[in-house]
Amino acid sequence: MATTTQPSQPTGTRQEWLAARLELLEAEKELTRRSDELALRRQALPWVRIDKEYRFETGEGDVALADLFRGRSQLLVYHFMFGPSYTAGCPSCSAIADGFNGFVVHLANHDVTLCAVSRAPLPKLMAYRKRMGWSFPWASSSDTDFNFDFNISVTEAQQRAGGTEYNYRRTHGFDGIPDPALRHPHSDACGIDLRSYLRDRPGMSAFALEGGVVYHTYSTYARGLDGLWGMHQWLDRAPLGRNEQGPWWLRNDEYGKTPR
């Protein structure tokens, strides 16, 4: 005798679904309008002139921050977690960066350059980019204060002392990690202990080039990056949502190879 399994969610008629969907639509429209307003407020932030000289290692050689624009007037930098001691890039940053190849060409044809920046040496970055199948620009800031000045990275001494800044907040002991040997799936994936892993954090920064002068216009960190993480935007519309019990994602070439 056949049995039917009840779905985990409440069920209803098409009419009941449509009524609930129309109610949700109004909330979605309000969120869209609010998001448009916030975008305008981002664009209205005052620009901060950058007078400090930053140098980066790229596939085209040693360049200045202005050169990362590649002849365009706008630059979007993704601060990719890949510290000097990492053996591979952060899995979360890698999942975000998987979407870059598809739209970097569209941005480039709209006067915007997208470039990832990390502290790891350039050969490490280029080898990892090849492994992941990416082609977007990636620069090494290993010999500059760039990551530190934009509150993405901290030194070991700062981490021990505490009181560092991330996401516009002061932290204590850099999230209060008491044990240097403490581990996490993502620090393991990068071949380092958790404290070393957390000397770099994710974020993005926007810059403008006008009259030969570079200006910092915007930065965001942590959950402020949600909108750039295409995978999560799709999951938010899936029947079970993100359905997360901790970090489940792997690098794009690891699925089916790493025990779950």
Image (tube, grey):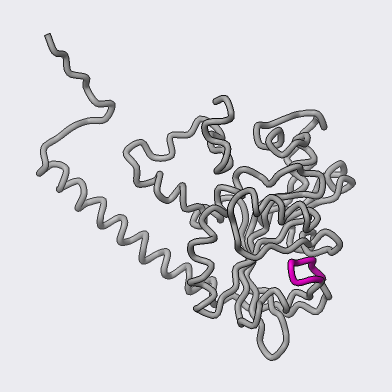
- Nearer-the-camera pick, 168 or 240: 240
Q: Quadrant of the C terminus?
A: top right
Residue at 60% of width from left, 61% of height from top? 135
Magenta residues (range): 55-61
- Nearer-the-camera pick, 204 or 44: 204
**Furthest residue in direction bottom, as rendered:** 211
Instruction: Tell me if 142 is positioned left or right of 10 in this view.
Output: right
Q: Quadrant of the N terminus?
A: top left
Residue at 21% of width from left, 19% of height from top? 5
Residue at 61% of width from left, 82% of height from top? 73
Q: Where 88 sits versus 70, above or below?
A: above
Question: Residue 93, position in %: x, y?
Answer: 61, 49
The answer to which image quadrant residue 220 occupies is bottom right
The answer to which image quadrant residue 224 occupies is bottom right
Question: Residue 68, position in %: x, y?
Answer: 70, 74
- Nearer-the-camera pick, 146 or 72: 72
Q: Is residue 182 magenta?
A: no
Question: Residue 25, position in %: x, y?
Answer: 25, 55
- Nearer-the-camera pick, 230 or 15: 230
